[in-house]
Each structure stands twice: as structure tokens, then as C-alpha cells.
Image (cartoon, coloured by chain):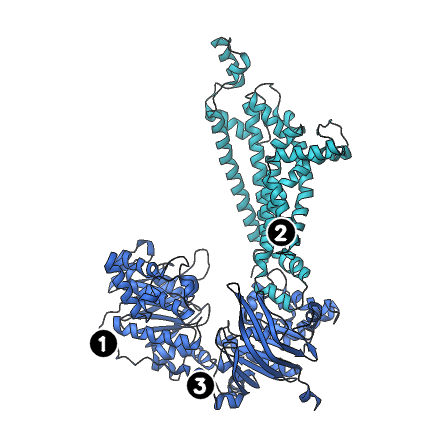
Amino acid sequence: MTETQSPLLRVENLQIEGLSEDRWKTIVKGVDLTLGKGEVLGLIGESGAGKSTIGLGAMGYVRDGCRFSSGSVHFDGIELTGADRETRRNLRSTRIAYVAQSAAASFNPAFKLINQHTEFPVRRGVMSREDAQKDAIDLYRQLQLPNPEEIGFRYPHQVSGGQLQRAMTAMAMACRPDLIIFDEPTTALDVTTQIEVLSAIRNIVEEFGTSAIYITHDLAVVAQMADRIMVLRHGAEVESADTATMLNAPQQDYTKSLWAVRSFKAAAKPAVAEGQVPVVSLRNVTAQYPGMSKPVLNDVSIDFHAGRTVAVVGESGSGKSTTARSLMGLLPPVSGNMVLNGAALAPEFRKRSKAELQAVQMIYQMADTALNPKQRIRDIIGRPMTYYRGLKGKQLTEEIRALLRDIELEPDQFINRLPSELSGGQKQRIGIARALAASPRLVICDEVTSALDQLVAEGILRLLDKLQREHDLAYMFITHDISTVRAIADEVVVMQHGRIVEQGAKAQIFTPPHAPYTDLLLSSVPEMDPGWLDRVLAERVAQSA
Amino acid sequence: MHHLLRLFVQRLALGLLTLFVVSLVIFLSIELLPGDVAQQVLGQSATPENLAAFRRELGLDQPAHTRYLAWFGGFLQGDLGNSLISGLPIWDLISERLYNTFFLAGFAALISVPLAVLLGVVSALYRETLLDKSINVATLTAISVPEFFVGYILVWLFAVEFALFPSIANLSEDASLGDRIYRTFLPALTLTLIVTAHMMRMTRASLINLLALPYIEMAQLKGASQRRLIVIHALPNAIAPIVTVIAINLAYLIVGVVIVEVVFVYPGMGQLLVDSVAKRDFTVVQTACLLFAATYILFNLASDLISIASNPRLLHRK
């Protein structure tokens, strides 16, 4: 009973300030939370909600340029915000551990995994080096890493992302801490890998009775992992409750809007008329990087029709983006050909005419890096208009303004801004406008919503759908997110290892029977039902038996 | 290991190609210089017959490409040719001085490289503090002052005010190691002051760049102290940029010592080069330049190889 009286972690009125433009701004505005022994708390919210800052704050850590301004963090009787460096440092690894979002970036590239794993157990005198190595191998085995005896002796770049994420969980467990902060541990992973990592994390946390704070923006994921969920927005709590209550009966409007976000669906379009010529076709395209022994694309054929969206889905490395590179003329096929409006399309972009270049435009995943930070919106959008369409002077300004209205940004406000003066969603809108400025026939959308919060992403999908209807555009929509496919696709192409596994109309792809890989892909997409993970894992065991 | 060998051979071939291009540049620039050794040696009163005979004797009557091939071909085989003026083999002229120059440069490197890396680590560790700023100001001041001036200041301070070291670094051929170190201390210190700033600032910048990376934050969240963070977690990943800058500075130590050697009357390559230019001893100038170029290329090759060896992605493939 004493456990309930003194929780492992008690955060009271926690306030954290961040320095922005020489002024301290509050980014966490008085959050309270308690965590009992063995309990898993899910923190959920959109970017900027302060999830990670709170998670790190629970370790007594703030990033450079931030500070605790008020409130307290009690970890097992120790107050962390006022504790000296030494005290806080000595708790880390041994009693509190952290699992970062990108294990690939969070392992030191210069050292073998197992040496990073054993660093602190050995330094803190928890175990000898030999014991720590043996224990690491045991943990690798428990987390179902392949070749547990050997995998630790590799460097990070020699191990896949999903395996690294499990190795990082193992590392967090090295000193058997009381509390682990999981900071979006599966966000960077493919769905089929995510499911393995989720079950591995859940098992080991249960096994050792570790308390955990699980930070994510994905509701379906948190539903599988957490006993209790806290919804955050703008650095403050919106509401918190146990998982079942939170999923079934959210109280606040914001929570309800998050829950309802996957509601957008583009209107169904009539089937393609018999004999209609596609805008662009890939015919039996096989492509290979110079110096590689195997092709990266194998016999890929896709038709893109005006006014319709082809969604290309698959995991990282499946050849989705490579297909787009071939289409753009960046990676000319070694065999097969490409067709634009019934005429051959030059395989290499250098040999394409201006009209051919104009016809295929691209929108990128990271609007942040795809826009020149030194150019004003006027120039970013105006340049393709001048280059492809010869627009100048007053006419050019008129067109830019019209296009800005099209993407629902007020021209007077935005035309002279720099990209740094825009939000993430607005930047992506400018990315869209730049593609449209050329008056293309086919637009390649490469994971255009992946970096955006759900509410913002939905706005972008609605906009793309509206623009498609207005301009009769063909879209190639590259994504790994099945719910986006459901929302916007007319046809679906499923890719794996550079080949097309299955392709056809959306309804056909989503109705069983599926190709085995499509089935794996679809069944790996987390659902809001808290029992989903157990059910899927049980089904898979039953199937393989 | 196969791909490492290929990388090595590739770099070596590139180095040789660079050496070839540099040899062409050196030879052609000397060809373009006004003045003529025969005229210089025999004086204004020499008859055309005498001049022609003299040129024939030295091979100056041959066409340029023949002379180039003979010279560069000989260089590659270790035959440096003879001096135009004295007729002695160039190797005999320069071997002692080459050794002296390498000795001085090596001495300066032994002080400056560890010093620069240490200062870089310390200023990264205490970044944005008074200590960091003092180190930056001190090294920048040292690099901003011309080297002959630094040399004279040191002479004034350590040879005149406090007579600790000799102001002239003249060496007898059979000087002991201790004596050599004693006599070359001031020139080595001058060079150290000149090259430390660059290496130190690169070390600091490379380390601070790394501090923003997730794996450094991870180490911090695992409980690593600041010192451990910088020395154990960041430094191994900063080797490549640091080594590149060290290589450039080492090469500078050998190539750029001319002025310092003159200030301290040190019998090294720099003095020989100055003398040979004055005497229009073109074969010596050519060969000395080519040796400098070869040193430069060698250091860069070495830094490339160390960078590769410090990168597990290149060393251990998937």
C-alpha cells in the first residue's frame, strides 16, 4: 500500500522556459503528473505540445537554451529540478533511462553497440565488463534481436533501424532502471518493423516491472502501450484518464478532434474511360545505380491518368522514391520506357525539352529543406512561372497572387515573406504552389504529409484534392501511411524490394484476399483498439504454427 | 579489406597525378623567368661562342621537353640532378639542409599539434567562458602578427632580456640532439605560435558542431560528464576534420619556414632556396620546389588515410 502513497515520480506544476529571440518564453506551462511503480503513462500531442520537454524534464534534464522556471520533479524522494549536476547525473542509466526517437542518430557511430551498452553499468560499478556483456546478450535475446551473441559487436551503421531501436531499449535496461522515458521510439520505423519493436518494448517493461513514460503523436500506438494517457497541447494538459476511458469517452473538444482526424476521404471518381491515353506511363521500367550489382527497380509499370491519384505504398527501401527519381529523369532506366501523352519521354532530365520538364513536377517531404531560405515566396513561386511559362512583370504578380489564393494563403500577407516566417503546414503549401506554378500534368507527392501533424496533414490532403479537381492533375502519391492511402487514392500500387507486389483500384486492394505482403502491411497498421497488438500477434503466431 | 586497398591505391594515384601537374607548373614557370645562367656565370663580356659552349656543357641547348623529361624522370628515380652553378649533385647540397628543415618542422609539430588539440578540447569544454575567449584571443593574436615579427619578439624576450636561448640557430654538423633542441627552440616556438591557432580553432569548431547531435545528447542522458562527453564521445568522431587541418599545417611548417629560417639564420631548405634564386641556380630551385610539393602531397595522403581509418562506415562495411 505504501507504493500508492509515494509514487515513483511526482511532477508538480512543472514550468520550463525556452530562450527564443533573446526572450524567455514558457514552453511547459504548469504540468502535474504522477507515475506509480510499474505504471506506463502515455503522453500524446502534436508537435510543439511540449511532450519531449516534459519527458526530459522528468529526468531533471533540459536542453540547451531551456531552464526550469517553477515547479518540482520528485523522483523517489529526490527533487530533481533543484538538485546539483552530480546528483542528477548519478541517477541516469542506473535509475532513469532514455530511449530516443531515432536510434540510428542516437548511437555513437564510432563505437560498437555492446560497448555503448556496457559503458555505464561498468562505470557505475553495477557489474563487471564480462557480466555486462553477458547481460547485454541476454537482453538482446529477450528483445528478439537476430544473432544476439554477435549483433552487439557491430557498429550502428551495420544494423537496421528497427534492430537499433531494440538495441537502444536493451541499453536503457542495462542497469535495470526504475523509470524509462520512451520518446517516440517507433516514429521513424516502418509499420511492419514498428509492430515488432512495440511488442518487444511492452514485454520487457512488463517483465522487469519498469515504470515508463511513453511519448508519441500516434494515438493507436499509445493505446497499445499505456495504462494511462495524458493529452497535451501548447505545453499544458488537456485531459488525462486511463486508456480505455480516454479512447472511448474523451471529454475535451481538442481530444475529440484528434480522435476524429482520420475522417477525410476524397470523393470517389468515375473509372477511367476505355482507351483514354494516360498522361504519363512507366512501362516495364528497370533501373539500377551505377556500380551496384542488383537493380533497385524491377519491371515497374504504372499508368497515371489526368485527374486521378495513384498511391504508391511500401516500406523504406521498397523503391517508391526511386520510381519517382526515374520519372523525374534523375535515374534513367536501364530497360523499359517512359511515355508522356503517348510520346516517348526522354529518360534523362538533361535531354528533356522544357515542355517535358514542365509536365512532371515534384512536392517534397521536407518543405523545410526544399525551399531556399533566402528567397521570398514571390521568387519561389515566380521563378517556375517565368521559366516555364514566360510570365513577367504585372502578369507574373497577378498569377502569383491567384496561386496563393488557390493554396488558401492571403496574398498580401504572404507574398513577400521568407520561408522562415511560415509554419510547417504553410511551408508545405508553398511547396505545392511551386509545383503548380509550372502548370504540370503530373505531380509527384513524396511523403508530403509525413512530417506534419495530423490536423495540418488533413488540411494539406483536402487542398491537394481540391487542386486536383480544379486543374485535372494526375498525382503520384508516395506514402508509407495506409490511412493516407485510404483517404486520397484512386489506384494503389504496393511495392516491396523494388518490385510491384500488387496494383489495382483502391477498393480492390483493400478488399481481401490480399497478396501476402499487402496483408502483412495492412495488418501491421496500429488500430485504436487497445487489444489490437495482442490480437495481431496472436493471429501471426497461429498462422505460422 | 579489398575496398580499403582500392581506396589507398586510388589516393596514391591521385597524388602522383598531382605531383606530375605540379612538376609541369614548376618547370614552365622557371622557363618563363627572365635571365640566363650562362650569362650570369660568364658575365657581360662573354663571347657568343663561349656562351654557346657553356650552354652545351650544361644541356641548356636541348629543347624544353627533353630537359623536362630528363629532370622529372630522374626525380622519380631518385636522381635529383646537378647544380647549374657549382656542378655538384643537388642531393649533396640539400640532404643536410632537408634534414635540418624536417627536424625544425618536426620539433615545432611535436609542440604545436598536442597543444592545439588540447587547447581546442579545453575551449570546447569551457565554451563561451572567459577561458575559452582568452584562448581564442591569444591564438588569434599570435596568428595575426607576421612571423618575422614574432621571431624578433621572441629573440628580444628570450635571448636578449633573459638570455635563455641563442638568438641564432646555427648548427654544426655533429651537434648532439640536446644541442640541436636547445638551438632550435626559438624558431620552433615561433612556428608553433604561427600554426596553433588554425588547428585549435578547427578542433574547437568540430567538437562544438558535434555537441548538437542526438548521440551526444544520448550520452548526456546516460549520465556522462562534460569531460567524458567531449573526450570520449565527441572527439573520435571529429578526427577527420582535425587531421585534415593538422596535415595542412604540418605541410606549412615545412614549406613555410623560409622566413623563420632567415630570421634565425638556420641552415635549412629555406635559406638554400633564397640563395639559389638569387644565383639563378634553376635546377636547385626546381628540385627544391618539387620536394616541397611532394611533402605536401604526402601529408594530404596521410591525412586522407587517417580520416578513412577513423570512420567505421568506411572501415567496416555492412
- Position of B281 relative to A220 (above/below): above
Callouts 2 and 3 on one subunit: no
Q: Secondary structure at mark 3?
A: helix
Question: For residue B133, which numbered disc appears in the image?
Answer: 2
The cyan-tinted chain is B
The tag earlier along the polypeptide, 3 or 1, is: 3
Question: For residue A253, which numbered disc appears in the image?
Answer: 3
Is any part of residue A33 visible from this angle?
A: yes
Q: Amino acid at mark 1?
A: Ala
Q: Residue at x 33, y 73 (%)?
A: A464
Callouts 3 and 1 on one subunit: yes
Q: Amino acid at mark 3?
A: Asp
Q: Is residue B285 left or right of residue B189?
A: left
Residue B80 percent across, percent down from the top left: 59, 27
Question: For residue A273, which numbered disc appears in the image?
Answer: 1
Q: Secondary structure at mark 1?
A: loop
Q: Quadrant of residue A322?
A: bottom left
Which of A400 and B68 lies nearest the eye of the viewer? A400
Q: Chain of mark 2?
A: B
Task: Name the quadrant of the N terminus of chain A.
Answer: bottom right
Residue B259 percent across, percent down from the top left: 61, 31
Which of A11 and B262 lies nearest the eye of the viewer? A11
